[in-house]
Image (cartoon, grey):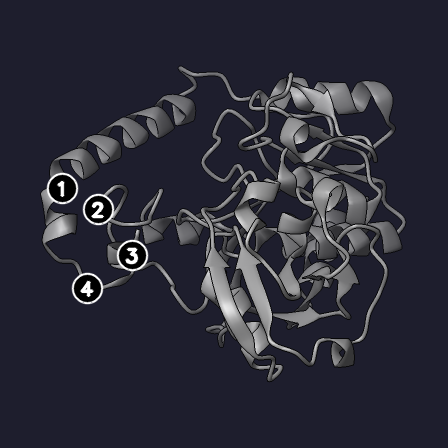
Amino acid sequence: MNFWYRPAGWQAFALLPLTGLFWLVSSLRRQLFRLGIKKVYRAPVPVIVVGNLSVGGNGKTPVVLALAESLKAAGLKPALLARGYGAKGPFPALVTADAKAERVGDEARLLTKRSGLPMAVGGDRRAAIELLLNHHELDVIISDDGLQHYALDRDIEIVVVDGQRQFGNGYLMPSGPLREGTWRLDDADFIVINGNDASAGQFTMTLNQSLPRRVKDDAVVSWDALTQPVTAAAGIGNPERFFNSLRQRHLTLENTLAFADHHQFSEHDFQHLQGPLLMTEKDAVKCQAFAQDHWYYVPVDAAFGPDLCQAVVDTLRSRHGL
């Protein structure tokens, strides 16, 4: 909602009664877990949760991928976990190399494709973790999202913050974009600022674009091949971030198509498209089956300052001797 990212106005104030109810329910739920009235599941291996305080894409997926690569390089055996937002299931489910995005979720499909790691999806995180452990020998599990899933105990929390939009108007949902107040940052082990300078003790993340790839077969193409005006499409939490990254490459964007986060794409969405199309990698995994020859996606990789991944590996080793 656009008014979330402006100074609070009448829309935010009109929703304050619902915001108060949201705060009451979420606070009560959190206390029930802390008091042990609601049970918390402790996995037999360390769990790293990568989440955010606000609704919408803040850049969790590149963080998860970077962590996965670093943990593998350190000689550990990681696996991935996600809710499978927007997917049909059934759950819990292992995510295989040929899994369809509509069944397991777009982020899960992307994470498995890029990392090659074991992964499970499902709203019941305990069942998903037990499914993983029944099929794989693991040292650590990385959960994509789940910061507010207090039914799952965690060893390390990483909060990713959109450096451009920050916390919007600072209100809880639905008056603002926050799932929890900014006080929650005090509980996190690591705070990552995506796309802006970080404060002392935080980590700055930049997203580096790789060469474009063709959606239908992942073939690499050069940026020089995209000299004519293009259409850019994005179904992510902050589409404008993707569009601006293309403009910074001096590409001419003839059209920009912004869809809701986790939009389930179909051929109908692009039926009037004539020229080249550029999209995010997360969107491309849902379009591969009907993609045209001139559709491309742009992979991104996270870089941190200072080295977040090494800090996480060091923390795991110091706490668990891995």
Q: Secondary structure at mark 3?
A: helix
Give the mark nearer the N terminus: 4 vs 1.
4
At label 3, the amino acid type is: Asn
Q: Are marks 3 and 2 in contact (CB under 8 Å)?
A: no
What is the spatial separation of the Cα atoms under label 4 and label 1, in whole angstroms?
15 Å
Q: Residue at x 76, y 81 (%)?
A: 224
Image coords of residue 113 (percent x, y):
79, 44
Q: Nearer the viewer, residue 289 or 193?
A: 289
Give the mark nearer the N terminus: 1 vs 3.
3
Image coords of residue 82 (percent x, y):
62, 34
At label 2, the amino acid type is: Ser
Q: Are marks 4 and 1 in contact (CB under 8 Å)?
A: no
Q: Residues within 10 Å of mark 3 (few under 14, many from 20)?
A: few
Q: Residues within 10 Å of mark 4 (few under 14, many from 20)?
A: few
Q: Are marks 4 and 2 in contact (CB under 8 Å)?
A: no
Q: Residues within 10 Å of mark 1 (few under 14, many from 20)?
A: some
Q: Is residue 13 visible?
A: yes
Q: Which residue is mark 1?
A: 16
